[in-house]
Image (cartoon, helix red, strand yellow):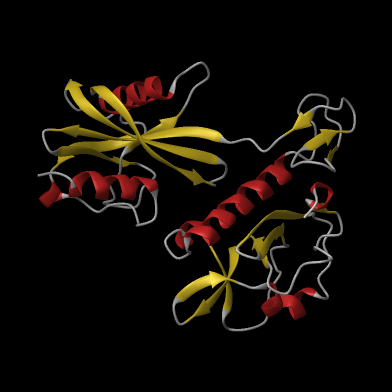
Amino acid sequence: MTANKIFFSDGLPAEAEEDSFILIFNAGGLLVKKNENGLILANYKEIRAGLESFKSSAASHFLGREKGASYYCFQADGDFKIQGAEFEFRDLRSLINCFDETQLRFACLAAQVLYWDKTTKFCGECGALTRHSPSERAKICTGCARVFYPAVTPAIIVAVMNEGRILLAHNKSFAEGVYSLIAGFVEPGESLEDCVMREVFEETGIAVSDVKYFKSQPWPFPSSMMIGFTASYKSGNIRPDGEEIIHAAWFGREELPKLPRPGSLSRNIIDIVMSNIN
């Protein structure tokens, strides 16, 4: 796929292969297909008939190609539907543990690209309209020629350990009874390690040391990159900030509370760290 075919101005890719995947989002989430194994992305040939009469002024985006299949995405109107009981729109968060690695990666990429497309219709510097670049995933201001690339917001998430126990907190935005790791956005001029130490202290009053990188995960809600760490308790008593964190405590492996759903980086870190405790 050549660079100048990254975007399609007529709403739908004119030359999508039969085995392509077109990730369609609307107000209800991402279009998926139900089968005997759960939920999967809908193949283009399965929804082609429903797309033939669909017209949209929104651009379709070429996302990439893997294992012989091309991936595209576009944002549909809220009332857009594909006929068939096996098709439905689902919130992307609920799909994180349903897709295989490839489909999840493209679903996250699609969500972030569409959010970027929606929020960069106008230049943030001079206010003029933007247009898609013909050669890369970028937008160019038609007034001042400023270039806008998809922005990714870094955020840390950390498992703080203290003699075989893990620090977990209940955020006021969580479902009732759910506890997770301390997390927060990186501030300008701040290293990732500094962010870990600041967020833990601000939200719980705990000082930490021995900050180590764990792994990362794209988090398209709407455009974050979650960067996971582990750290060791250094000093202090737990004092929830009362603004974001309602309650926090140390938990051993046999006394863990209700945790985030599988598939999230927070749950992955908790499961791995606690399974390695002797």
Q: Nearer the viewer, residue 237 or 176?
A: 237
Report the quarter where the N terminus lies: bottom right
Residue at the spot 46% in from the left edge and 18% down from the top edge? 190
Count of numbered labels shown in the rendering: 0
202 relative position to 34: left or right: left
The residue most toward the top is: 189
Q: Horizontal and vertical percent for residue 199? A: 36, 26
Q: Horizontal and vertical percent for residue 159? A: 27, 36
Q: Quadrant of residue 8?
A: bottom right
Residue at the spot 48% in from the left edge and 64% down from the top edge? 99
Residue at the spot 74% in from the left edge and 38% down from the top edge? 120
154 relative position to 200: left or right: right
Report the quarter where the C terminus lies: top left
Q: Horizontal and vertical percent for residue 136? A: 77, 41
Q: Is residue 239 visible?
A: no
Q: Is residue 105 visible?
A: yes
Q: Nearer the viewer, residue 238 or 99?
A: 99
The residue most toward the front is: 68
45 relative position to 204: left or right: right
The residue most toward the right is: 143
Q: Horizontal and vertical percent for residue 248? A: 23, 36
206 relative position to 76: left or right: left
Q: Determine whether 102 is above or below 221 in the image.
A: below
Residue at the spot 50% in from the left edge and 39% down from the top edge? 225
Q: Determine whether 186 is above or below 48 in the image.
A: above
